[in-house]
Image: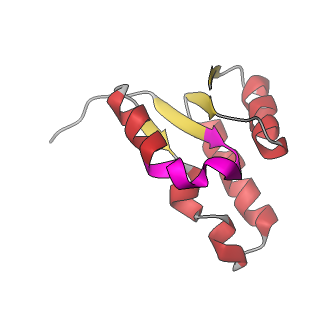
Amino acid sequence: MMFEKKIIVYTAMSKYLFYFRESISKFVLEQNCVPLNPFLLFNYFLLDTVDRDKIRNANNNLVVISDELWVFGKISDGVLAEIKLTKEFGKTINILK
């Protein structure tokens, strides 16, 4: 069995970086961490086939179970909410621009 404990990183980004979602996950993996990328898990709100608040709640659960939050690019309202939640739990936040 191949297992090495790694830091789990929630990748916070605005919709403007949606097209870079794979590149952002690749970057996190190259830093020897495991990415939790909401745009790869839920696309962009599952193309509005699911209530957006359900997706936001799922994202917030991912923030809470992650070890760290890494912010990529512009801080949108949604990213700011993820930063605030991360701070409430006393977790590491890295802002990468």
Relative to 33, 96 lies left or right: right
Q: Residue 76 or 61: which is nearer the viewer?
A: 76
Residue 20 belongs to the span the image colors magenta: yes
**Which residue sits at x=82%, y=39%?**
81
Q: Residue extending furthest left?
A: 1
**Which residue sits at x=41%, y=34%?**
27
Colour mapping: secondary structure
Image quadrant assignment for residue 70: top right
- How many marks the image carries: the answer is 0
Which residues make up the magenta segment?
12-22
Residue 85 lies, with reference to residue 61, above or below; the image says above
Q: Residue 78 or 9: which is nearer the viewer?
A: 78
Q: Is the N terminus in the top left, top right, bottom left or bottom right quadrant? A: top left
**Which residue sits at x=68%, y=50%?**
16
**Which residue sits at x=44%, y=50%?**
22
Relative to 64, 51 lies left or right: right
Residue 69 belongs to the span the image colors magenta: no
Q: Main secondary structure of the magenta part?
A: helix
Image quadrant assignment for residue 74: top right
Residue 39 lies, with reference to residue 4, above or below; the image says below
Residue 49 lies, with reference to residue 67, above or below; the image says below
Q: Position of residue 77 (x, y in %)?
A: 84, 43
Relative to 49, 21 lies left or right: left
Q: Position of residue 93 (x, y in %)?
A: 65, 22
Q: Residue 6 or 22: which is nearer the viewer?
A: 22
Relative to 48, 10 lies left or right: left
Q: Position of residue 65 (x, y in %)?
A: 59, 38
Q: Is the C terminus in the top left, top right, bottom left or bottom right quadrant? A: top right
Q: Position of residue 57 (x, y in %)?
A: 74, 55
